[in-house]
Amino acid sequence: MTSYQTTPFVILFLACSSCSPPAHPQAADASTINPRTDAEKKAAQFIRDNENDPGSVEFSRFGPDDEKGVIIGGQSKPGGSVIRVRCRAKNLQGAMELKDVLVFQPADGKTTELPNPWGDDWLKAMQSQPHEDVGR
């Protein structure tokens, strides 16, 4: 009968300057964590009203915003606004989930939100988008 012997081994993780972890997003300062304008307050309330667990919402950033409503053709008319919101809230399974959204608040229509894959650069990205692609 053959006997097998297990040999313990150790994996070493060596730190080096070229192996640094990925950069983390810049932390928001206190002035961007709380809603500053009426449009941001309305966006915050819209987010709370539409979450599975409104009490779990933790805002981490508001802005940059477009409160003139003229940047994004077709989605926001003059007099409306587009508010960028980053927050965490519990999903249906009860796990905290990060979301970064644009809340569209047209002056004469229904408030909606869309995912924001651009982060802080959303305004620049939207300015370069053809109007028919906005919101898809």
Image (cartoon, rainbow, N blue to C red):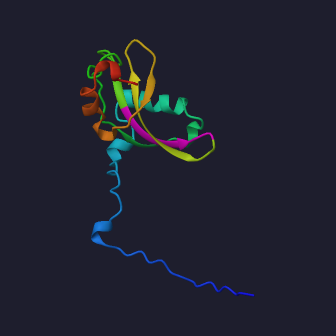
Q: Position of residue 50 (x, y in %)?
A: 54, 30
Q: Nearer the viewer, residue 46 or 75?
A: 75
Asked if the stretch drawn in magenta spans residue 136, the answer is: no
Question: How many numbered circles does the render carry?
Answer: 0
Residue drawn where x is 34% and y is 31% of the image: 37
Q: Residue at x 30, y 25 (%)?
A: 67
Where the N terminus falls, by quadrant?
bottom right
Taking 8 as reference, is 76 above or below it? above
Q: Quadrant of residue 52?
A: top right
What residue lies at 28% left-to-right and 67% top-to-bottom?
18
Quarter containing the C terminus: top left
Of 135 and 85, the residue lying toward us: 135
In the image, farthest residue toward the top: 108
Residue furthest right in the image: 1
Measured along the vertical axis of the image, is residue 118 above or below residue 49?
below
- Which of the 4 image quarters holds residue 82? top left
Camera-side residue: 72 or 35?
72
Residue 100 appears at what percent x and percent y? 42, 38
Q: What kind of secondary structure does the magenta stretch mostly adopt? A: strand
- Percent across and percent down for residue 2 are 71, 87
Left or right: 48 as drawn, with respect to 105: right
**Against 74, is 49 above or below?**
below
**For residue 33, what is the image quadrant?**
top left
Left or right side of 51 for 116: left
Q: Is residue 2 above or below residue 12?
A: below
Boundaries of the magenta span? 84-92
Q: Residue at x 62, y 45 (%)?
A: 94
Q: Quick one: 9 or 111, which is closer to the camera?
A: 9
